[in-house]
Image (cartoon, rainbow, N blue to C red):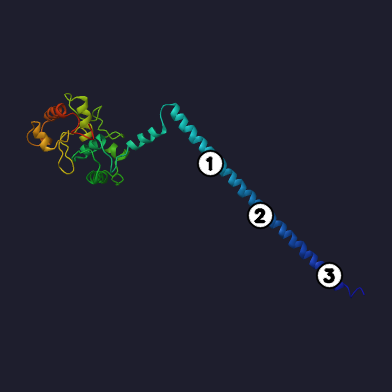
Amino acid sequence: MTIKHHAPLAARSHQIRREGALQRSLSALRARGAARAHGCAARSALRRRATVALTTLAATGLAGAALAGTPAVAAASTSAASVLHVGSRGPAVAALQRKLGIAADGVYGPRTRRAVMAFQRRHGLDVDGVAGPATLHALGLPAGGGDGSRATGAGASDGASPTLRRIASCESGGNPRAISPDGRYRGKYQFDVGTWRAMGGTGDPAAASEAEQDRIAAKLLAARGTAPWPTCG
């Protein structure tokens, strides 16, 4: 009888061992799954805390800037002012163009970009056609893009009124030899030839002396106000 029942008992014992091993494997898998879920939850919580911290820092920075009287937007504008590129306009562009030896119309277009790239290539700078701090420094210009030679950056003579200095700065960057890309507007105040001659000027406005251009501009301002300069008046 003992011999007869030995095989079933051994088989049952083997099955029990297999079931035990399977149970241990399932337990291990459940433990790893729980650990993984816990890790995901921890990472998610960490991301949430980081987001909150960054938001708080940003709000604190903006508030601090406001309290100091220096808005964050103003800081961004100051940074942007140190880079001149296609589409930029004004006295800073005109000063750049004068340094490059091209007509200073105060408009950063394809011609100015080509001149900047040629200068960058000659001086071992990054050739990107953008007048950033490195290019401006190599040209002897301050980072803000002015010519550094006059407090107003306009180049207006001492005899010009504040209104004419403002107009000249806007129209040509104060350059009496400035000529618009299409050649129509000429000189410090960007006269067209018809207006120049109607006010008593002779020859090419851009070839006249700066004092003569100031005189004709003052005469035009007295006669018609700032209407001849709709953008800069």
Give me the C-alpha separation between circle 2 and circle 3. 35 Å
The location of residue 139, given as percent across then percent down, is 25, 37
The answer to whether one can see residue 116 in this image is: yes
Residue 33's disc number: 2
First in residue order: circle 2 vs circle 1: 2
What residue is pinned by disc 1? 51
Give me the C-alpha separation between circle 3 and circle 1. 62 Å
What residue is pinned by disc 3? 10
Above or below residue 119? Residue 188 is above
- Residue at the limit of the structure toward the right, as seen here: 1
Secondary structure category for the residue under label 2: helix
The location of residue 63, given as percent across then percent down, is 47, 30
Above or below residue 186? Residue 164 is above
The answer to whether one can see residue 172 in this image is: no
Residue depicted at x 54% and y 37%? 53
Is 206 positioned to the left or the right of 28 in the image?
A: left
Type of the residue with mark 1? Thr
Secondary structure category for the residue under label 1: helix
First in residue order: circle 2 vs circle 3: 3
The location of residue 233, given as percent across then percent down, is 22, 31
Residue 227 position by quadrant: top left
Is 66 positioned to the left or the right of 119 in the image?
A: right
Question: Which of the pair 59/95 is nearer the observer?
Answer: 59
First in residue order: circle 3 vs circle 1: 3
Above or below residue 40? Residue 94 is above
Point out the image quarter for the N terminus: bottom right
Residue depicted at x 27% and y 38%? 138
Above or below residue 46? Residue 155 is above
